[in-house]
């Protein structure tokens, strides 16, 4: 009797239909959930950002130092900081605003390496373009002039804006002490001021070097003696390199080419000299339109053509550290050296 079929009345049929509907609904819910899970997983993978580490410029040699985050403010050692760049303020660009924002976070003395206000260094361009950006740090700035500044007759816009900070008694060159370091600021617009040893500037430079008792010396002017940039090497400034080299100076900072470049120690003829050579930095990255590297000069150790930034030096009593701080918040180059 247990194997006999059960009756199939209306109530039994209704129950069977209801159970089938429940099973069908459960199957649909399960399938929908699986599809939804797969869709969320795929969407999550697509939304995960890729690593966006800075890609090296084609101009960077293979020994380029890895980028790192900025460490602003005074040096941990308490030794003085010198920070700045050249080729700075153009009212048609906002890059000078970006480099000025870096200065807002870095204590120390600010330098400029020429071409402070574009296009021709007029009083109006200093007022309208430089003052709202790097001008926030005027009280701690020690400037150098460049060829664009000289496009206004007698360097009038530069002299009016910087006053005595840009030189005394009509001269556009001067020197000062920063901690244990002697810092020399020169004017490489030789057509206007003269750069040869017998010129007023040349005689002053030699006398200044003779009088200095500092172990470490750093010099700043606009036109680089050596460069892989658009303007290339400039032999007209050899009268600066020669006495600096003989006096045992250590570091030269220039602008003019709108890029960043670091050289190994060299003598005035461009020969490698690790014992007594000067290390040159080209830092034309203050805000003017950037340019590339048509060539690679001898002893060039680092080249960055694709970012604005400032260079920060920590000047120890017998050594120095440098870091090129980019407006993207990374350090594109860094290192250290000993004084002669």
Image: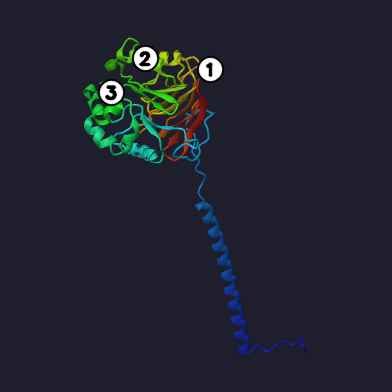
Q: Position of residue 109 (x, y in %)?
A: 38, 33
Q: Position of residue 304 (x, y in %)?
A: 45, 30
Residue ID at (37%, 14%): 207
Along the viewing direction, whichever of 94 and 55 lies nearer the viewer = 94
Badge 3 crowding class, 10 Å Cα cut-off, few under 14, some 14 to 19, many 20 or more, is: few
The numbered mark, 3 or 2, whose residue comes first in the sequence reads: 3
The numbered mark, 1 or 2, whose residue comes first in the sequence reads: 2
> Disc 3 designates what residue?
168
> Disc 2 designates what residue?
207
Which type of secondary structure does the marked residue at label 3 adopt? Answer: loop
- Give the Cα separation between the discs numbered 1 and 3: 35 Å
Residue 300 visible to the viewer: yes
- Give the Cα separation between the discs numbered 1 and 2: 24 Å
> Disc 1 designates what residue?
275
Residue ID at (53%, 35%): 66
Q: Is residue 155 shown left or right of residue 314?
A: left
**Rendered image: mark on residue 244:** none
Badge 1 crowding class, 10 Å Cα cut-off, few under 14, some 14 to 19, many 20 or more, is: few
């Amino acid at each position: 009797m247990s194997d006999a079929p059960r009756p199939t009345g209306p109530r039994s049929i209704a129950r069977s239909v209801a159970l089938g509907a429940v099973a069908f609904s459960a199957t649909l819910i399960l399938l929908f959930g699986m599809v939804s899970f797969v869709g969320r997983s795929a969407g999550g993978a697509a939304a995960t950002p890729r690593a966006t580490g800075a890609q090296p410029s084609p101009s960077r040699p293979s020994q380029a130092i890895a980028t790192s985050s900025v460490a602003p403010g005074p040096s941990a050692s308490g030794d003085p900081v010198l920070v700045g760049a050249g080729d700075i303020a153009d009212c048609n660009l906002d890059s000078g605003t970006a480099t000025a924002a870096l200065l807002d976070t870095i204590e120390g003395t600010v330098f400029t390496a020429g071409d402070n206000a574009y296009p021709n260094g007029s009083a109006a361009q200093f007022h309208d373009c430089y003052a709202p950006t790097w001008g926030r740090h005027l009280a701690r700035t020690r400037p150098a002039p460049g060829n664009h500044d000289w496009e206004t007759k007698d360097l009038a816009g530069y002299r009016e804006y910087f006053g005595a900070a840009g030189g005394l008694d009509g001269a556009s060159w001067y020197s000062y002490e920063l901690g244990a370091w002697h810092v020399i600021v020169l004017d490489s617009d030789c057509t206007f001021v003269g750069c040869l040893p017998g010129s007023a500037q040349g005689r002053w430079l030699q006398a200044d070097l003779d009088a200095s008792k500092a172990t470490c010396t750093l010099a700043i002017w606009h036109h680089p003696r050596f460069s892989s940039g658009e303007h290339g090497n400039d032999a007209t400034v050899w009268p600066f390199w020669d006495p600096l080299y003989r006096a045992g100076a250590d570091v030269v900072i220039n602008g003019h080419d709108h890029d960043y470049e670091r050289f190994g120690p060299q003598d005035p003829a461009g020969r490698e000299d690790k014992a007594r050579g000067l290390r040159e930095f080209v830092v034309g990255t203050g805000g003017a339109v950037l340019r590339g590297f048509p060539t690679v000069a001898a002893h060039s150790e680092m080249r960055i053509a694709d970012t604005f930034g400032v260079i920060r030096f920590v000047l120890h009593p017998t050594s120095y550290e440098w870091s090129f701080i980019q407006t993207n918040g990374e350090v594109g180059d860094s290192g250290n050296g000993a004084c002669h």
